[in-house]
Image: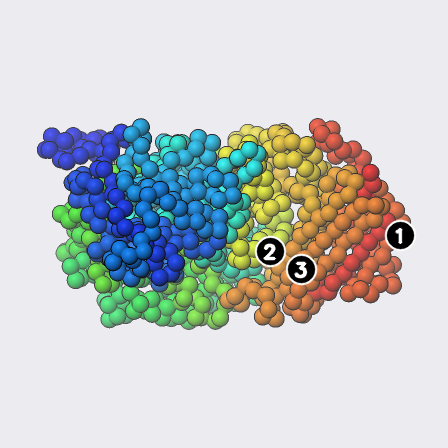
């Protein structure tokens, strides 16, 4: 099956027209007359169950399903579910054991449906919850979701005569439903794609969701993941309201966004909508991740810097990379290998020549002693090789996806492969066992799941060639060398509606598994395709958890709704261009919305060779990705940070700050794990009423208070950044501050080795001294940065710190291996106070962590009396405690307000992190 060119696609449409095909879709066509609601009753669980009957049958994209079931339920105070499916036959849905949720009752289970007794009154009626109201019109059936607090309509599926879209359409292989939208709504999400216009959805850009191995450098295409959710942010009379809509469906789909409407066109499954009421962006992500699964707890070391390359040919090269990072004094925590360590590119093996086991184990012992870690790649394709134990055991356990009863044959890096069927419980058990066997061979610290969209170098139904070696070891490894033939005779391989796959309406089996292939119990690849990477991730998580009781670290290329509960993500094969540097911010922010907060892009670009200037700017930005990794292509020159003296300097500067901020970033990891809050997030998350920030895609926040403003263009030594109202302190030089009375665009100096990082007022963040390993940095004393508004007459600030035994499987309080501290500060009436409130003190005390310094920003006067209490007891000897103040003028303050102020450092402290302390002094904020 060859890839269809755009010209050929057009030609095929013309042929269909000439041959009398039923229908060629254009935006103005409408399909059918919709459905009518004929009965509605209360379900046993307190929801509603109704019957829908098609109004007028047609055969556009196949016959209508005549009889549908409607189920509506307020799942919680802030979540409404609307589920529509075939009333007669069970249809494919995302497996309920994979993404846990309640199964809708059937019509027969519902009260008053068959008997028509006590029906819920038909007409334009309402079903009200705590914050969301469901209402409907019976004929043609449509529904709306409104916000109770302000009456705003969040979703409205009705189709009027003037609307270019249809009423509800529900066929076996084509589902269509739309919603009206106000012109001023700002939408985000619908991924994974590289969005050239930034984080806001851009009207009339294509949004196709179908997991595909297409490089991320391709714009507006269906990439590695499928996340059919969007967040809608509206400013209503100066007040911000956000909500989210999830269509829980794994089939391929096109989503058309016009600016005033949004239309789903889905090629299978059911309509299973979840509406999350917000109203703040953080509330939305909290509610969404409460449903799809809270983000995975990540180990502390994973927030260090990672170095990878496809092409570390042997162990001595790997050793050399680690040594050179150490010589250059650039932080490095994790070293990775692509398929270079494997024997014949077969997963779960070790090359006996290039990576001999005794020497590789000695290398691991060495780096583990330093606190470093080692992660390797795993592809799902299992080489068809009768001498390969992984394959032998897979065949014996009958774990592979099949085509007409035989394992489906594809080609990836080792040559011919079979793909495990992770929907099969036996496959999961086999995979867990293979991970255990591999860990005994090579005790790696994490696994990197690649090619799991799933990717295939061939098309159609393939067999091993007779009389020739495949692959033959020459030329690029991605050229198909199997004997293959088309598989397009089934409606699954050639569905009536063509989603815009690969941007050219490519066949949906192109470079992947034939969609008529089968998983366990006859489940079609057609339906399960986009959850393949998710199912592999779940199985891998189970395998790693079973090893040593450690917290798993998994990086997955393909993701689906809920993947963040198990894994981190990188944004795939990007390009070493300034444009791709810029796009990386939007994709990172998207995945925060999707509940995958541990995300980053290949620093310096995957290919081709980056310029020295680009690599400087990329490490400055990439040092503040939640997941920070340099990764390069086999065919690109080496690009480790030490390859250029200038890049090494930028790396030391930017990563040096990252490693100082590790306690703050790791605390954000805890917040993400417990509330879903993205680690990296758009500025409007903290300033949701400022509409100028709604499309801002060139800056971002870490948490609520640390703002990153990178240089994203060649030849620039300054950057223009927007500053929301308040005081922003430069974290690299805290004597420098910017004060804005209203959102203000300012031009900042940004020489080659400088990235602008600012801390917002009213915040306390914990920092440490840093180091070249997280293990080393973690053992250093703490410095509390207290940021008051510049020169305010009264002020307060607060912050938190979470610490734990970071490789324990669970990240939580109450197990004796974690500590949580609230920090508070106030200033006013001539007195400044800073104090802590410790929960779970035991763990921090056992580590002996101390606070050695408190840095206070924004004060403008000083007095003399000073006292410290620890657990309510005054500290008598404060002779070691030194006050130092730096008077300065904030250079940008003339733009708004400010002037002569103090940076105060209280040094020489030895405050145990695990004990409550309070300090106060007659100093600080005067009118």
Q: Nearer the viewer, mark 3 or mark 2?
A: 3
Residue 387 visible in image: no
Distance from disc 3 to disc 2, alpha carbons, whole Å, reads 10 Å
Q: Residue 591: which numbered mark, if any?
A: none
The reply to whether discs 1 and 2 touch (Cβ–Cβ < 8 Å) is: no
Quadrant where the N terminus lies? top left
Give the x, y percent position of residue 827: 78, 47
Left or right: where 618 falls relative to 126? right
> In the rendered structure, which disc, 1 or 2, sits on the residue that comes first in sequence?
2
* SS state under label 2: helix
Left or right: where 860 falls relative to 380? right
Q: Which residue is mark 2?
A: 667
Q: Which residue is mark 3?
A: 821
Above-or-below relation of 619 to 407: above
Q: Which residue is mark 1?
A: 865
Residue 762 visible in image: yes
Distance from disc 1 to disc 2, alpha carbons, whole Å, reads 34 Å
Instruction: Decide: few, some or many residues near mark 3? Use Cα within 10 Å; few <14, some 14-19, many ≥20.
Output: many
């Amino acid at each position: 099956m060859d890839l269809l060119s755009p010209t050929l696609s057009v030609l095929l449409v013309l042929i269909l027209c000439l041959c009398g095909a039923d229908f060629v879709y254009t935006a103005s066509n409408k399909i059918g007359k919709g459905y009518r609601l004929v009965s509605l009753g209360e379900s046993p669980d307190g929801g509603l169950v109704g019957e829908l009957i098609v109004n007028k049958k047609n055969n556009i994209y196949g016959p209508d399903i005549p009889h549908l079931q409607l189920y509506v339920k307020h799942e919680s105070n802030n979540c409404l579910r609307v589920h529509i499916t075939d009333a007669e036959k069970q249809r494919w849905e995302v497996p309920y054991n994979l993404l846990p949720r309640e199964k809708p009752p059937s019509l027969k289970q519902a009260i008053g449906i068959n008997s028509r007794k006590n029906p819920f009154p038909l007409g334009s009626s309402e079903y009200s919850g705590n914050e969301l109201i469901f209402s409907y019109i019976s004929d043609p059936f449509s529904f709306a979701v409104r916000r109770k607090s302000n009456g705003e309509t969040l979703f409205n599926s009705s189709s009027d005569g003037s609307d270019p879209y249809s009423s509800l359409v529900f066929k076996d292989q084509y589902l269509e439903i739309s919603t009206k939208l106000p012109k001023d709504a700002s939408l985000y999400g619908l991924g994974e794609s590289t969005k050239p216009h930034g984080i806001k959805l851009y009207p009339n850009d294509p949004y196709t969701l179908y997991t595909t191995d297409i490089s991320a450098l391709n714009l507006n295409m269906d990439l590695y993941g499928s996340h059919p959710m969007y967040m809608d942010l509206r400013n209503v009379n100066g007040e911000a309201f956000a909500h989210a809509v999830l269509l829980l469906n794994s089939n391929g789909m096109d989503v058309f966004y016009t600016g005033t409407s949004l239309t789903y066109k889905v090629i299978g499954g059911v309509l299973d909508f979840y509406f999350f009421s917000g109203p703040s962006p953080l509330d939305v992500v909290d509610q969404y991740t409460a449903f799809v699964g809270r983000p995975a707890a990540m180990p502390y070391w994973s927030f260090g810097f990672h170095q990878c390359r496809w092409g570390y040919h042997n162990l001595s090269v790997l050793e050399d990379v680690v040594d050179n990072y150490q010589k250059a004094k650039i932080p490095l925590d994790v070293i990775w290998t692509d398929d270079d360590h494997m024997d014949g590119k077969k997963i779960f093996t070790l090359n006996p020549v290039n990576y001999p086991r005794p020497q590789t184990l000695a290398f691991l012992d060495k780096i583990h002693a330093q606190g470093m870690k080692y992660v390797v790649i795993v592809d799902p394709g299992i080489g068809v090789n009768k001498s390969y134990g992984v394959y032998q055991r897979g065949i014996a356990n009958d774990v592979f996806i099949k085509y007409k009863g035989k394992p489906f044959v594809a080609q990836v890096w080792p040559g011919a492969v079979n793909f495990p069927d992770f929907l099969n419980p036996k496959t999961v058990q086999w995979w867990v066992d293979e991970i255990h066997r591999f860990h005994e061979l090579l005790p790696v610290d994490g696994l990197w799941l690649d090619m799991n969209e799933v990717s295939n170098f061939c098309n159609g139904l393939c067999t091993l060639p007779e009389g020739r070696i495949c692959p033959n070891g020459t030329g690029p490894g991605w050229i198909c060398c199997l004997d293959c033939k088309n598989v397009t005779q089934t409606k699954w391989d050639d569905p009536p509606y063509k989603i815009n796959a690969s941007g050219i309406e490519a066949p949906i089996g192109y470079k992947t598994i034939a969609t008529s292939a089968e998983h366990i119990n006859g489940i079609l690849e057609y339906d399960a395709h986009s959850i393949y990477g998710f199912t592999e991730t779940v199985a891998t998580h189970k395998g790693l958890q079973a090893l040593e009781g450690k917290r798993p670290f998994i990086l997955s290329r393909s993701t689906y709704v809920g993947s963040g509960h198990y894994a981190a993500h990188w944004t795939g094969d990007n390009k070493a261009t300034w444009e791709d540097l810029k796009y990386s911010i939007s994709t990172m922010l998207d995945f925060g919305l999707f509940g995958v907060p541990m995300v980053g892009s290949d620093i310096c670009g995957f290919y081709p060779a980056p310029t020295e200037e680009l690599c400087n700017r990329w490490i400055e930005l990439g040092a503040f990705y939640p997941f920070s990794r340099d990764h390069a292509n086999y065919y690109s020159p080496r690009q480790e940070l030490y390859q250029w003296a200038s890049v090494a300097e930028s790396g030391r500067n930017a990563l040096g700050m990252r490693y100082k901020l590790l306690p703050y970033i790791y605390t954000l990891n805890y917040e993400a794990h417990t509330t879903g809050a993205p680690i990296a997030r758009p500025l409007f998350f903290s300033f949701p009423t400022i509409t100028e920030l709604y499309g801002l895609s060139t800056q971002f926040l870490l948490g609520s208070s640390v703002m990153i403003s990178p240089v994203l263009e060649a030849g620039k030594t300054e950057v223009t950044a927007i500053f929301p109202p308040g005081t922003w302190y430069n974290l690299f030089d805290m004597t420098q501050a910017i004060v804005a009375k209203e959102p203000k665009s300012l031009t900042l100096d940004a020489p080659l080795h400088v990235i602008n990082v600012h801390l917002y007022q009213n915040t306390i963040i914990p920092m440490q001294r840093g180091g070249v390993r997280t293990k080393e940095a973690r053992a250093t004393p703490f410095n509390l940065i207290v940021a008051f508004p510049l020169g305010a007459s009264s002020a307060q600030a607060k912050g938190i710190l979470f610490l734990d035994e970071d490789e324990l499987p669970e990240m939580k309080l109450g197990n004796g291996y974690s500590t949580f501290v609230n920090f508070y500060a106030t200033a006013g009436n001539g007195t400044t106070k800073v104090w802590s409130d410790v929960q779970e003190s035991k763990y921090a005390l056992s580590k002996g962590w101390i606070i050695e310094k408190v840095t206070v920003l924004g004060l403008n006067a000083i007095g003399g009396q000073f006292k410290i209490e620890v657990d309510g007891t005054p500290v008598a000897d404060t002779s070691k405690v030194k006050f130092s103040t730096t008077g300065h003028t904030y250079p940008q303050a003339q733009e708004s307000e400010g002037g002569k102020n103090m940076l105060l450092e209280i040094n020489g402290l030895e405050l145990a992190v695990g004990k409550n302390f309070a300090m106060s002094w007659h100093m600080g904020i005067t009118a």
